[in-house]
Each structure stands twice: as structure tokens, then as C-alpha cells.
Amino acid sequence: MSKLRTADEVAMLIEDGMTIGISLMGLAGWAEEVAQAIERRFLETGHPRDLTIVSSSGAGDDKEYGVTRFGHEGMVKRWIAGIMRQAPNMGKLVQENKIEAYNFPQGVVVQLWREIAAKRPGLITKVGLGTYIDPRIEGGKMNSKTTKDLIKVIEIDGEEYLLYPSFHVDVALIRGSVADENGNLTMDREGILLEALPLAQAAKNCGGIVIAQAEEIAQANTLHPKHVRVPGILVDYIVQPTKPEHHMQTEAQYYVPSFAGEVKIPLSAVPSMPLDERKIIARRAAMELIPGAIVNLGIGIPADVAAVAAEEDVSHLMTLTTEAGTIGGVPASPPDFGHSYNPEAVIEHHAQFDFYDGGGIDIAFLGMAQADKDGNVNVTKFGNRVVGSGGFINISQNSRKVVYCGTFTAGGLKVEVKDGKLIIAQEGKYKKFVEQVDQISYSGKYASQVGQPAVYVTERAVFTLDKEGLTLTEIAPGIDLEKDVLAQMGFKPIISPDLKTMDLGMFSEKWGGLAEIVNAKSK
């Protein structure tokens, strides 16, 4: 018997108070056809209401598609999410204290589905210790309405861990490319595999239901068994979208063959970046590379490291990965984040975080919105504006080395390079190096305890994390230490007795010095 249903039919199965688990990143994996039907039913009838929504990653397209479909007062009671931006209606409810909001690290959510599926008590991990996720600090609670502690500190053999407890899952909302009439689901046209399989297992073993959106329907027993990513025994209902835009591969693209691994596209030479603050930061950050490095690049300036590496002809010396599961190739920027052009391999979301959490990344280049005297970094919350950590905590805490990349100040900063010297033409309005960050997304204290090297790179200064706190080690040529650095900070850092000038070659239009620097190191 076919499991094919309309979106309106499956929307009627969602009851008040249910917990819905969702597999997505941006719009990858997102069942938009089903979500619209659930939203439509609520607007017409007031049901379902008081839902708990659990999502691991980017929650939509920052506009009308994605988890924002559930952002109506009364529809959702609690939201547990890896990232809370990209769903404006839901974010507004969080800011207005109209729903409970918890931020769990992205890797924790995708791994937690396996613990629930196996009926284990929860996920035990060190991810989040010392950050705002730690229940002794904030417990991942993102507004004042959220009061209950869900995360626990436990001790095993004298070491501290966090326990993220298992919970009941009523509905799994997943997506694939082709489903046969038995519910077997492939993902050949999807750009990333995500966590559909463990989520479906979790829902089924909780006695819940699994709803899968599939772009094409095939006759029963006609799919190649090794192409099936979620077996039909786990899928209760299949919904076929009525419009292509309800099955987007990314936030911006309906379908890119290279993301799906169906073709290898010729990668044109990466155009040179202008010699501005971003390029200076990326050049200096790239100096931390080592031959053969397995690398993760964050969004924003960290992504420019790839462009610098290409320009300096050292791309072959590293392998770029994304937390979504791509390995090799060239990671795409937002709005296609998480995907890669010409990946060598694509593995499942939770499997990638197994590798990341175990220290598989040699170097992570990540963003930096705020940093303080203790080396703490904030990228997750600013006032009442909630963002969430995504994979930041997993990645920053477990990489063998982390390099933070960001401008020294924010809000109108303008720089010029003249005669090999950096000139601050207009200072930014906001200090990014503050006495205490608004929220601890990265704990400098924890990093020091475990001996993790950390470097903080800006266009005018470089810092390292030492046991005593943040230490200034380099300044750019042409920069005045007192006026351009210390006066623009909310605290006075430790100043290295061996304070150096940043590599002069980086302040030339043509550098050509990176290969020698990287090759001089051994892994």
C-alpha cells in the first residue's frame, strides 16, 4: 500500500503539545510543502498549538521559508535549536519572551537523535563546558521566559562532562530526493545528507511518526538498496511537493549538480581580493596553516582564507571541510553554506561531528564578534538579539588549534594601505575587544586548561591566548600602539616583551610569501 499523502493530510496528524524533530540546514533537508500545510492549519483552526520544535542548524532562508513558518504566537511552546537566526518570526517570539528558547550546540542535537533512538539516557560530552551552554553559567537558555535547566553537569572518573538528556519525539520531519511506495528514501540530488536517518530512528522508537517529503515517487522495490539513506520501515508518510521552490537544495538554489556530486565543474581562477582589512586578516590567518591540514572555515572573513590560499597557490596543502559533512572541494558561501563545489566525499551530519569532536580538525578559522581579556569569544547573543552557536562550540572547543578572524573595531571601519603601512582612515564605532563579552561562546579558561592554542587575528594586531589571558604579539606596520590599539580596547592586554611587526609582505599588492611560511612547518 502506498504511503503517499498530501501535505494537508499529514498536517492533520500533528496534535497539540507534540515534539517535532527537524533535519535541516538553511533550506537543505527542509520539507517546505509539509510546513506550509501545518502553518495553514494553525492559522485556520488554532491547532496544532504548544508544540516543541527541535532543529539542529540554520533554520531557514531569513525570509518566509523554514522554521519561521511555525513562528505564530501559541503555535510553539518551546524551541530547542542549534541556530536561531534565519527564522525571523521565531526569533521575534524569542526576543519578546513568548516562547521558551534553548540553544544546544549543533553537533549535540544531531548526535542526540542517536541516543534517543537507542533509548540511552542522553548525550554525554564535554562540548559546552565553560560556555553559556554550561548550566552553571546560562544553561543554553536564550531568554528570561526559559527557566528550566535541561543540561546537567556530571562527573566520570574525576572529569566533568555535560549530559544532554534524551526526550520523547512524536514527529520526525525529513526530506529526500526519491521515495518508493514503501517509503525507502534516497538523497542523490540533495547536496548534503544531514541527520535524517537517526532522527527517523528516534521518532519510530519513541512510537512517533516519520513524515518524508520526496521530490519524486518510484515504484516499490525499484531503488538500488545502497542508494537508500532512510529505509521504508522508518517512514510512515510521503509527501510530494507541488512546486519546485518547496524543495530547494539550498537557501538560494533549486539544484546545483556539483553540490550533489553529479558533475565536477571547472573552478575558474579565484579573483584576487582587494588589499583591504579583510585580505590582511585572511593573509595573516593563513600563516597559521600547516602542510596537510584538515581545516574548517567559518562564515565571513574566515572564508577568505580559502581565497588567499588559492591566490598564493597553497590550496593543495589543505583539505577544506564543512560541519554539514562535505570533505574536500571548495565550500560555498552563504546562502549556500554547508555545501561544497566538487566535494571528494559527503558523509552524514552526525558522523562529521563525531570526527570534529574527537579532534579531527587541525585548524579552525572562525569569526569573532567580541573577545575579552580572558580570551573568551562571543558570536551568539547581542543584547536581546539571539543567534545561537551552530557548530561553533563543537568546532572551537575541539579543534587542535583555533584562529579567530575579525576586524579590530566594528561599525564604519575604513583602512588604507600606503607604502607598505596600514592607515586607519576611519575608526569603527564599536570596540570588539571588551572587558567582558556579552555571552561566552568560547571559553578562554577552558582552552587554557586543555592546552588548546588560540590566535586572534585582526587587521592591525595579533593576540595569543596565554595562561594569564590575552597577549598582544604583533602589530601592523604604521600602527601606533597606544592610539590605534590600546585606546580602542576595553581592557589593557598583556604585551609580549617580543612584540613584533606583522609580516611586511602582507601589506603589498602582491605577496607571494605564504607557501614558504607554510612549507617550513611540519605537521
Image (tube, helix red, strand yellow):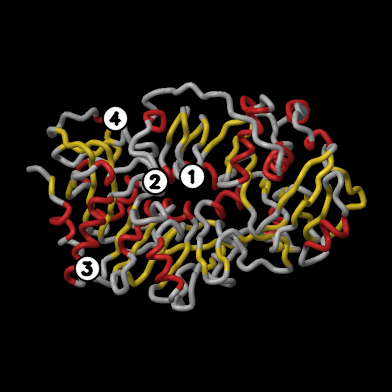
Q: Which mark is residue 226?
A: 4
Q: Amino acid at mark 4?
A: Lys
Depicted 367 relative to depicted 259: above or below? below
CA distance separating discs 3 and 2: 25 Å
**Element under disc 4:** helix
Using the image as rendered, state which of residue 397 and residue 516 is in the foreground.
516
Counting from the top left corner in percent of width and height, residue 264 is at 43, 23
The answer to which of marks 3 and 1 sits earlier in the sequence is: 3
Name the residue that disc number 2 marks: 251
Would residue 439 be found to the left or right of residue 500 on screen?
left
Q: Nearer the viewer, mark 2 or mark 4?
A: 2
Using the image as rendered, state which of residue 291 and residue 161 is in the foreground.
291
Counting from the top left corner in percent of width and height, residue 386 is at 50, 65
Q: Hey, which quadrant is residue 42 in on the image?
A: bottom left
Using the image as rendered, state which of residue 161 and residue 95 is in the foreground.
95
Q: Amino acid at mark 1?
A: Pro
Q: Amino acid at mark 2?
A: Glu
At a point 65% along the width and 35% down the height, the residue shown is 273
The answer to which of marks 1 and 2 sits earlier in the sequence is: 2
CA distance separating discs 1 and 2: 8 Å
Kindly indicate whether the residue at mark 2 contacts the one at mark 1 (C-beta within 8 angstroms). Answer: yes
Name the residue that disc number 1 marks: 334
Kindly indicate whether the residue at mark 4 contacts the one at mark 3 (C-beta within 8 angstroms). Answer: no
The answer to which of marks 3 and 4 sits earlier in the sequence is: 3
Name the residue that disc number 3 marks: 43
Using the image as rendered, state which of residue 236 and residue 27 is in the foreground.
27
The answer to which of marks 1 and 4 sits earlier in the sequence is: 4
